[in-house]
Amino acid sequence: MKYEPWNWDLGTYRVCKFNKRLYIASEDVLIYTPPDFIILNSRQQLQVLVDRANTRGQLHIKDVIVFEARAPRPKQYAQRKTFPEWEPL
């Protein structure tokens, strides 16, 4: 079997819910779910990341890092003092 590197460019991305968790999915493949230390009250918070992925055509790791850095966290987790900026599309 020939090794094929993982391709994140699977088409249109969307937010979906599976087993009470929010995910970013593409063509019924679950690609990303925020870690437990991220508080998501609605799909709209994750939609920002999905919109950027759809504009770029792929889910970029730098966008995920910025999303996780800016997302609210429970009190027991350390809050960031500075936030990275979104890269221009």
Image: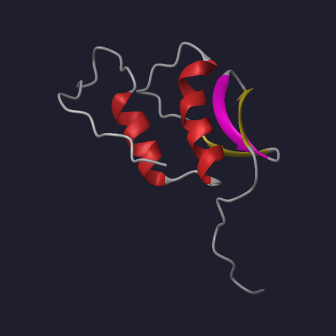
Q: Quadrant of residue 37?
A: top left
The main secondary structure of the magenta stretch is strand
Residue 75 coordinates in the image, percent (x, y): 28, 14
User: Residue 79: within the magenta?
Assistant: no
In the image, 25: left or right of 5? right
Residue 36 coordinates in the image, percent (x, y): 47, 28
In the image, 54: left or right of 75? right
Q: Which of these two is toward me, 34 or 63?
A: 63
Q: In which quarter of the image is residue 78?
A: top left
Give the residue at x 64% y 27%.
Answer: 22
Vertical placement of residue 4 versus 44, above or below:
below
Q: Which residue lies furthest to the right in this view?
A: 27
Q: Give the range drawn in magenta.
A: 21-26
Q: Which of these two is toward me, 38 or 14?
A: 14
Q: Quadrant of residue 18?
A: top right
Give the residue at x 52% y 34%.
Answer: 34
Residue 26 coordinates in the image, percent (x, y): 75, 46
Vertical placement of residue 4 versus 85, above or below:
below
Colour scheme: secondary structure
User: Which quarter of the rendering shows the N terminus?
Assistant: bottom right
Give the residue at x 52% y 19%.
Answer: 40
Q: Residue furthest front?
A: 88
